[in-house]
Image (spheres, rainbow, N blue to C red):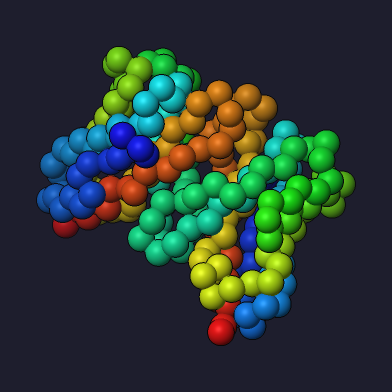
Amino acid sequence: GAGVSQSPRYKVTKRGQDVALRCDPISGHVSLYWYRQALGQGPEFLTYFNYEAQQDKSGLPNDRFSAERPEGSISTLTIQRTEQRDSAMYRCASSSSEETQYFGPGTRLLVL
Amino acid sequence: SQKIEQNSEALNIQEGKTATLTCNYTNYSPAYLQWYRQDPGRGPVFLLLIRENEKEKRKERLKVTFDTTLKQSLFHITASQPADSATYLCALDPDTGRRALTFGSGTRLQVQP
């Protein structure tokens, strides 16, 4: 595709349920990043991959959050046992060998 | 502690004037700094990157400066237009080679016709 895509665009779930957010990066992009963005704030780093290897997961809030990118392309961010404080916009970005990151439209998660 | 600060108050200017947005950081030594534009409901869009050994970078009506002594970057839009109204985010790579950006909270620019 022409840009980074994310699905679903909106997700409403009940507290305690698991959710999986998907990111499809720009074809050929080596690096993939996950961020979380609260209203009125800039994106906050969660984790990133080079190819299929998770390079840094220091931004993941706790062990309920995990991410994978098994074939070095599509990535999934999974949140287990969701809590209301997990409600936010989750953004994915990808980049080639350059520093510029291309962001997707995001997934708005609402935990009731 | 490490901080990136952008003016949280919205900047309102008249069409045709130059908008100047500020990004200050503390306790970082970034190799480069980037500016992104974000429209409501959309993801950030890359505008400009400036490296630590560059004083100034230009692209059409945009100009970015980077003062590593002051730990400050200024972002200018000349001959501003209502279509320039958006939130502008600065971001830096806190660890050389890591490329996982740390963002400021952004400054909202409103250009009045």
Q: Position of residue B48 (x, y in %)?
A: 64, 47
Q: Work out whether residue B17 or residue B71 is closer to the camera in this orientation and state it.
A: B17
Q: Position of residue B21 (x, y in %)?
A: 68, 64
Q: Does residue B58 sit above or below B27 in this rendering?
A: below
Which corner quadrant holds the C terminus of chain B? bottom right
Q: Quadrant of residue A79?
A: top left
Q: Position of residue A92 (x, y in %)?
A: 38, 39
Q: Does residue A88 sit above or below B9 in this rendering?
A: above
Residue depicted at x 27% and y 30%: A76
State the residue lying farthest toward the front.
Answer: B60
Q: Does residue B82 sit above or below B34 in this rendering?
A: below
Q: Position of residue B23 (x, y in %)?
A: 69, 57
Q: Work out whether residue A56 or residue B78 is closer to the camera in this orientation and state it.
A: B78
Camera sees residue B108: no
In the picture, measured across the screen, residue B60 lies left or right of residue B103, that is: right
Residue depicted at x 25% and y 35%: A22
State the residue lying farthest toward the right.
Answer: B69
Residue depicted at x 69% and y 51%: B59
